[in-house]
Amino acid sequence: MAESSNSRSRTVVLLGKMGNGKSATANTLLGREAFESLHSLGSVTAACKLDTSVFDDGRILNVIDTPGLFDSYVESNAMAKEIAQWINLAKDGIHAVLFVLSLRNRFSEEEASAFEVLCHIFGAKIADYMIVVFSHGDALGKNATLDDYLAKNCPHQLTDTLKKCGNRTVVVNNWVEDEERLSKQREELLSLVETVVEVNGGNPYTNDLF
């Protein structure tokens, strides 16, 4: 499928375990509190939801938040049904898939298995659309970098996952109160989304690709 007629519009979907910061990252992307998260008093995401922001420069961002599809109790057939929902929500296709991990937790066997199931359902091509987002950036410490963290906390399953995703990674701290820092994080995320768009020749991921 060719690029959407609105070249200023992008659609992204966030995947990951409950508590990894999917909804908070979605809010950072949108620039507002559109989704409930564990940080809030409301309930967390129970079904796929879509929200949209239109930025001052005319860019349109559609963000799809999902349940904890990578949690240990989620079976592969249930994952497939939920994924079908977010494919349906993205009528013009998906420009990037954000796989959200937490720097506060080790990469789990469940996450590794769920990633493989995702690739099995959609084929290896889905990895070309993926960005690995490490949330809870404050856990790195003041002067540490992601490379420092990965040098000490990178099991081979995570190394393999990052490689399959083209080593496209970004660190976010969704709880900072400085609007300038939040804006900078958002632009870094959106810049990676544009990288994914370029890698895939401007073609969003659609049902036609699997």
Image (cartoon, grey):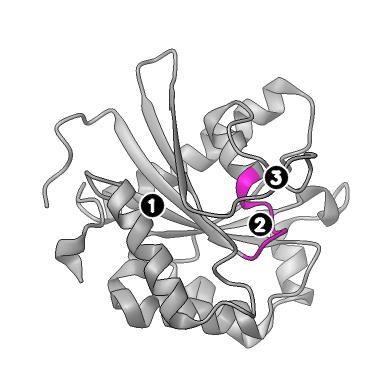
Instruction: Kindly report the distance in space between the C-alpha atoms of the residues bearing marks 1 and 2.
Output: 16 Å
Instruction: Give me the residue at 66% from left, 57% from top.
Output: 134
Disc 1: which residue: 96
Sequence order check, earlier mark of 3 and 1: 3
Q: How crowded is mark 1: few (under 14 residues within 10 Å), some or many (20 or more)?
A: many
Where residue 91 sits: x, y (%)?
24, 45
Disc 3: which residue: 37
Disc 2: which residue: 134
Bounds of the magenta segment: 17-23
Q: In which quarter of the image is residue 209?
A: bottom left
Instruction: Kindly report the distance in space between the C-alpha atoms of the residues bearing marks 3 and 2.
Output: 16 Å
The chief SS type of the magenta part is loop
Where residue 169 sits: x, y (%)?
56, 57
Give the answer, above or below, for where 179 lies relative to 82: above
Q: Is residue 85 inside the magenta stretch?
A: no
Indicate which disc residue 190 carries: none
SS of the residue at dot 1?
Answer: strand
Give the answer, above or below, for where 177 lies relative to 94: above
Where residue 103 sits: x, y (%)?
76, 61
